[in-house]
Image (cartoon, rainbow, N blue to C red):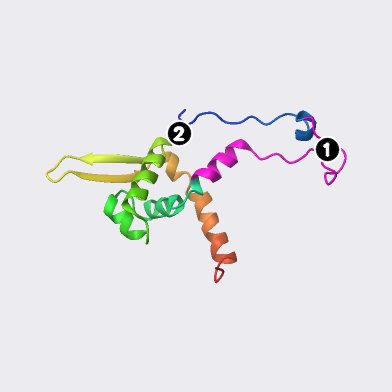
Amino acid sequence: MHHGPSTAVPRANPGRAADAAGLEPDPHVAPGQPEPICCPYYHQAVELIGRRWTGAILEILMQGGPLRFSTIGAAVPDLSDRMLSDRLKELESYDLVERTVYPGPPVRVQYALTRKGQDLAPALAELKRWARTWLRGAA
């Protein structure tokens, strides 16, 4: 299974994080309750999807893929070609987007979500619903 450029995923320590690190326990955590620990897979996913422009690119591909580079760029205001290229390469490396080259002339390149990328649809739809409810008018 391919996890993108880095397959290293940090492992959570069993037991209390403070004890494992040799620190004093957090006095705000009730005795007998485990200290909260962020799931490393959740963290990796949020960091990937939360990168600048990545969510917008995925949203555009969910609406109308497969799409040409220029179509994606035109759909996301203020997104430079360089940044779009970088983000598409990153999404390809995680197997979320696939790039297809059609021989020319002229040569055409299209981008589409893979099945793995399409599996993000429910999570992104829920995030969109939340944003419309709670972020409308905020800025």
Residue 56 lies, in percent from the top left, at 43, 55
Residue 109 lies, in percent from the top left, at 24, 44
Which residue is located at x 43 percent, y 36 percent? 94
Question: Mark 1 and mark 2: span between their CA atoms?
Answer: 35 Å
Q: Which mark is residue 39?
A: none
Which residue is located at x 37 percent, y 49 percent? 83
Does the magenta-highlighted stretch encompass residue 35?
yes
Residue 2 lies, in percent from the top left, at 45, 30
Which residue is located at x 31 percent, y 59 percent? 74
- Which element type, helix, strand or loop, lies under badge 1? loop
Label 1 vs 2, first from the N-terminus: 2
Q: Give the quarter of the figure containing the C terminus.
A: bottom right
Most extreme residue toward the right is 31
Q: Nearer the viewer, residue 69 or 130?
A: 69
Q: Nearer the viewer, residue 63 or 109?
A: 109
**Residue type for callout 2:** Gly
State the image quarter where residue 126 is shown.
bottom right
Most extreme residue toward the front is 23
**Residue type for callout 1:** Pro
Mark 1 and mark 2 in contact? Answer it, CB < 8 Å.
Answer: no
Q: Which mark is residue 4?
A: 2
Viewer-nearest of discs 1 and 2: 1
Classed neighbour count for the residue bearing mark 1: other residues with Cα under 10 Å, few (<14), some (14–19), many (≥20):
some
- Which element type, helix, strand or loop, lies under badge 2? loop
Vertical comparison of 115 with 61: above or below: above
Vertical comparison of 15 with 56: above or below: above
Q: Which residue is mark 1?
A: 25
Q: Which residues fall within the magenta stretch? A: 22-48
Most extreme residue toward the bottom is 137
Which residue is located at x 53 percent, y 44 percent? 47
Q: Nearer the viewer, residue 139 or 56?
A: 139
